[in-house]
Amino acid sequence: MPPDKICKTVHQYNKKPVSEGDMQKLLDIAEGYRKVKNYVYSRYGGIGSLAKIYPGYTVQNEMTASGYREVVGLPSVYFYLAVFDALADIKIQWTRTKTKIGKLINKNGSFTEEDKHYLRFLLKVNNAFEAVLNQKPIELTAKIQKQYCELAGQVDVERIHRYLCRKVRKYHVKLNTDAADVFSIAERAYRYADHGIYISTKEKRKRVFILLTDNNQYQSQLRIKLYPEESRIEIKAPVNVTVQNHRDYLNQVGVAAGFYTMLTTDEGHRYGEKLGRYQLEYSEWVRIQTSSYRRNKDNNPGRKKYYDKKRRLEERLHSYINQELNRFLITEKPKTVYIVRLAKPQAGGYNKEINYSVAQWQRGYIRKRLWQKCREQSIDIVEVLGKDISKVCSECGEFGSKEKGKFLCSLCGYQSEDKINTARNVKKRGQGDGKLY
């Protein structure tokens, strides 16, 4: 059953410029937050602390006893959030390391299937993984211990353990952050009132007041992002919204995403036809400004105007994307949307200008917003395999040719716009055996 509510992030902004004094007080909190995170990274980011980071209360207790909170002068409402933020990052970094090693295992031709199975077991079972890296006996619960012994009896354990330790030393890195402009804030560290928000500072019983553009009030952990050059802040709040169910949303819609036209459906309907113009304007302006800044970096007085216009261009682009996605859902009334799983951007290209434009393509933002909006409206999204999907004829399934935005199949004679043919193939694969999710 789909969930009744889903979590989404809402944003709040300051109505008036934040004074220099108030901004400095917030920056002091962010700097202390950064120092705490880096301390946790350095102390608990290595193999010796693997047993402590799950679930993390041991780290919390040790950090309390360390006295580091008094050293940085950070109130507890910020200190412990910084600790658990850093722990979350460390866990993610270990997941990346395990994923990397898992890929290497699959590609290693010198390993037998038993070797690979044993290594995957070590990567999956945290206690076993930690024991191997710290050269300790592997002690697990009775049921898992029995499974471990069966797998270990089929391989050269010492050789496998040396391999795993060697790869972890090579690919696992301790984290570090230079970001001193962001921090999380607990409920008891802020209060909404007077059309704004009061935020606790490092001084006892002293709060900074920020007048907001809206009167919404939230009761949850918030994320504060500071923009000192622009005298502004951004507040992110997680909220649970009720999922909408539409009885008339019954259609199955295949879509093809593009740089110039955002979405083209299998029926030939287009949404976001101005996207390419907006993206080119944005990327060209950023490219020129970046080049100019690099040439005159020593004599440049600041980048406030640059950041202001860059934000306006991004906001216009994102506003247009959301508007067209809303129009797409309202018009098409889909029960299921089929879309290609986009590949990661590749290096190289025709020339620097084209590369720069493609690098600024908002496809990640489009995908994220489409998924969020579909979840809010109880619409299923099915991602499909994209290999050769634009080269195959959607009528007969044979390879055809593309020229100037048109698709032509020399076998059956089918002709259509290139994106429509792709969207039809997306729908067929999604309803057949080519779907991923």
Image: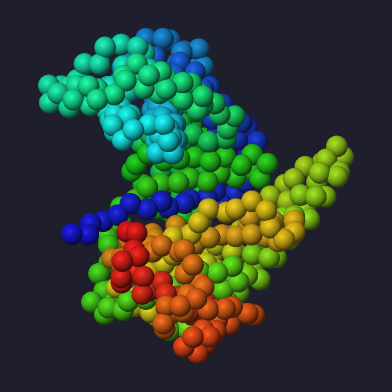
Q: Residue at x 60, y 45 (%)?
A: 232
Residue 10: x and y in percent read: 42, 52
Report the quarter where the N terminus lies. Answer: bottom left
Question: In this picture, is 72 found above or below 16?
Answer: above
Image-based side of 127 in relation to 64, left or right: left
Q: Residue at x 26, y 74 (%)?
A: 246
- Give the quadrant of residue 51: top left
Image-based side of 124 in relation to 266, left or right: left
Residue 14 shows up from this direction: yes
Residue 255: x and y in percent read: 44, 73
Image-based side of 48 in relation to 28, left or right: left
Between 340 and 307, the one lying in front of the other is 340
Between 201 and 80, the one lying in front of the other is 80
Residue 12: x and y in percent read: 48, 50
Residue 191: x and y in percent read: 40, 39
* Number of marks drawn: 0
Residue 323 shows up from this direction: no
- Give the quadrant of residue 407: bottom right
Q: Residue at x 66, y 71 (%)?
A: 277
Q: Residue furthest bottom?
A: 413
Question: In this picture, is 347 found above or below 164?
Answer: below
Report the quarter where the C terminus lies. Answer: bottom left
Q: Residue at x 22, y 59 (%)?
A: 2
Between 132 and 320, the one lying in front of the other is 132
Question: In this picture, is 22 found above or below 197?
Answer: above
